[in-house]
Structures are given as structure tokens and as C-alpha cells.
């Protein structure tokens, strides 16, 4: 019986990355196009880079959907968009007390970062003030890191969130520039870039990532990773499309667990020292290979997502323990 020979030196590439080599687009594409038989060596190589920067620590993040649905944008992947027919809960802003309660729940789940998310195109002055007031109280009473995701930001809003103590602001690029028009028509790729740059200018750590599985090519997946490197995103959520019934992308199913692992490995090679987070769609796309994703990524969400259920926290804690990894908890 013939044994397939490895054709790529993934361990050697990892060592070069550790020494400071910036992976090229061609090298990143080779990761995505690598034979499935090389997956274990590829993940080992990604782990060498991950271990160099993060050891065996895993960061947990928890989302609070502070305002659900009623969004005027037409993003094809989103159950909260104006074009979605998905049966979801729709409600206006949660009270400050509910937001503070979410912070306490985040700590109970061992999450060090608390993510306050709201649907909509752009927050109003009043909404920014509402979030800022809650963030100030969270920062005064806990050691949680606070991330906000409230839509497009103008300069004054970014500055107000920074002054309140927001650590990070999430605004995903979602997909490549060329694929963007096939996903939404109510805003542009450049609009997304502008908000990330506003966040950086205000001194807030930029959190920006992608949703894979929306018709992008392998080359476009690499473009996303390179764009995030150029932007200087500190935290990179890697979402895998969960095709929700009632959304325009409800029938799109092009991901496999192995493809997801290669995408995570590629993102680690391109952005070696950044927080890579396995985000929405983890459970339905990685399935039984979820744990393997943490050899490349160093962060996950714990609990539910915006409108879809996540794996229960005990299973996540056990998964991390079984790997011999350790949760990076928020100090009380």
C-alpha cells in the first residue's frame, strides 16, 4: 500500500513565521489548497505559532444582544436584516440593568470579554450615551474587558465610547471587497473600513473579522486575511455561515469541518500574534472537529450568539480541559 507523501513544509513555514516572516498571499492560498492528508501537520504548524504567542490559554467571550432585529440593512446572512423572514425575537434597547446583569453572567461563564451588540445601521447619540453609562459602571465594578458592536461609527461616537472605557469595538469586514455587493447593497466594503479606522483613531482596539462560506473563492478568503493584517485588527472573529431559514443565504452550504480548519490555520499564519476567535457557526460547521480549531485559534464565544444557540458552557469548558488547555479567566 502506498502512503501519501507530504508536499508542503508547514512546520518550516511556521518556524519562519515565528522568526518574523510575513506570509505571502501565495503561501496563504497554499494553506487553503493543501491536501486533506496534510491536515494534521498543518494544524500542528498553526499550533506552533499559536503556542508561541498565547501558550495554551483560551479566551472566552460572551455576547449580549442588546437590541434585536428591526435593522434597515439587507445583509443576506443576517436574521435581523430588513429582508429576513426568520422568526426571531425583536426588541428595542435593553435597560442598563439588563446590560449590567449580562456582565455578571459573562463572569459566571468565565468569559473575560463581554460583547454588547445591537442591530441597526448606526447608533444615535442617545444610544451611545446609554451604552457609555452602562460601560462606565461595568468598568467600575468588574475587571471585564468590554467590546461593543453597534454598527457604523462617527468620530464623536468612537471618542465617547473610548472615554467610557470600551476596550474593543467589533466591526467585521465580513467578506472580500469583490464579493461584498453580492451580500448586501445598503452599504459598502469601504463603509466598513471607515468605521474600523474611526475605532483605531479613537484609541479603541479594533476587532474585525469575516464570515466564511458566502460564495467567496479561496483567493478572496486570503484577501480578507491580508486586509485584516493591513488594518491591524487585534481580534479576528472567524465566523462560518450558519444558513438561517428565512434569510437570502438559507440554502448556501459550502463549508466542511476540514475547510473550516484550513481557514483557521490560514488566518493564524497570516496574523500570527493576533487573537483568532472561532465565532458564529462553530457548532454547525466544525461539528465533531470543534476542538481541533483551538490548535489554530485562541478564543471562542461561550453561550449563545445573536439569534442562534451555541454549545452549552459546560461542554465548552470540558472541551478546553480535554485538550490540556486552560481558560484565561477574568480576574475578580
Image (tube, rainbow, N blue to C red):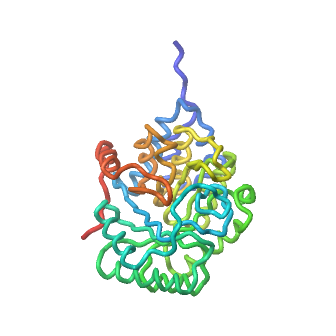
Residue that protrudes farthest toward the left in the picture: 332
Q: Quadrant of residue 74?
A: bottom right
The one nearer the camera, 319 or 43, is: 319
Q: Position of residue 94 (x, y in %)?
A: 44, 74
Question: What residue is shown at x 52% (from left), y 12% (from top)?
Answer: 1
Q: Position of residue 203 (x, y in %)?
A: 50, 80
Q: Is residue 189 above or below residue 301?
A: below
The one nearer the camera, 191 or 265, is: 191
Question: What residue is shown at x 55% (from left), y 77% (from top)?
Answer: 199
Quarter the C terminus occupies: bottom left
Question: What residue is shown at x 48% (from left), y 60% (from top)?
Answer: 274
The count of marks equals 0
Q: Quadrant of residue 101?
A: bottom left
Residue 47 in view in this figure: no
Q: Position of residue 193 (x, y in %)?
A: 65, 70
Q: Quadrant of residue 188?
A: bottom right
* In the image: residue 30, left or right of residue 100: right
Q: Position of residue 244 (x, y in %)?
A: 58, 50
Residue 209 in view in this figure: yes
Question: What residue is shown at x 31% (from left), y 74% (from top)?
Answer: 143
* In the image: residue 150, left or right of residue 188: left
The one nearer the camera, 53 or 154, is: 154
Q: Is residue 276 above or below residue 288?
A: below
* In the image: residue 235, left or right of residue 121: left
The one nearer the camera, 217 or 11, is: 217
Amino acid at each position: 500500500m502506498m502512503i501519501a507523501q507530504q508536499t508542503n513544509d508547514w512546520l518550516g513555514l511556521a518556524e519562519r513565521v515565528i522568526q518574523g516572516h510575513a506570509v505571502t498571499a501565495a503561501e496563504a492560498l497554499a494553506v487553503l489548497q493543501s491536501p486533506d492528508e496534510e491536515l494534521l501537520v498543518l494544524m500542528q504548524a498553526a499550533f506552533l505559532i499559536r503556542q508561541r504567542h498565547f501558550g495554551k490559554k483560551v479566551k472566552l467571550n460572551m455576547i449580549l444582544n442588546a437590541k434585536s432585529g428591526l435593522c434597515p440593512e439587507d445583509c443576506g446572512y443576517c436574521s435581523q436584516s430588513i429582508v429576513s423572514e426568520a422568526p426571531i425575537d425583536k426588541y428595542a434597547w435593553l435597560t442598563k440593568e439588563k446590560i449590567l446583569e449580562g456582565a455578571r453572567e459573562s463572569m459566571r461563564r468565565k468569559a473575560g470579554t463581554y460583547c454588547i451588540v445591537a442591530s441597526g445601521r448606526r447608533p444615535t447619540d442617545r444610544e451611545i450615551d446609554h451604552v457609555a453609562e452602562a460601560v462606565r459602571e461595568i468598568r467600575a465594578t468588574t475587571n471585564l474587558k468590554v467590546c461593543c458592536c453597534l454598527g457604523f461609527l462617527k468620530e464623536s461616537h468612537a471618542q465617547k465610547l473610548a472615554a467610557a472605557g470600551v476596550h474593543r469595538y467589533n466591526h467585521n469586514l465580513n467578506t472580500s471587497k469583490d464579493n461584498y455587493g453580492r451580500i448586501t447593497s445598503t452599504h459598502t466594503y469601504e463603509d466598513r473600513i471607515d468605521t474600523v479606522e474611526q475605532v483605531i483613531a479613537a484609541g479603541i482596539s479594533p476587532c474585525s473579522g469575516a464570515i466564511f462560506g458566502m460564495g467567496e473563492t479561496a483567493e478572496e478568503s486570503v484577501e480578507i486575511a491580508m486586509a485584516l493584517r493591513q488594518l491591524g485588527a487585534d481580534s479576528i472573529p472567524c465566523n462560518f455561515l450558519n444558513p438561517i431559514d428565512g434569510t437570502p443565504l438559507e440554502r448556501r452550504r459550502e463549508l466542511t469541518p476540514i475547510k473550516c480548519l484550513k481557514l483557521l490555520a490560514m488566518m493564524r499564519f497570516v496574523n500570527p500574534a493576533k487573537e483568532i476567535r472561532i465565532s458564529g457557526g462553530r457548532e454547525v460547521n466544525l461539528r465533531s472537529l470543534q476542538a481541533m480549531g483551538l490548535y489554530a485559534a485562541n478564543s471562542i464565544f461561550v453561550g449563545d450568539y445573536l439569534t442562534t444557540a451555541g454549545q452549552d458552557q459546560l461542554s465548552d469548558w470540558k472541551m478546553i480541559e480535554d485538550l490540556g488547555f486552560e481558560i484565561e479567566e477574568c480576574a475578580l
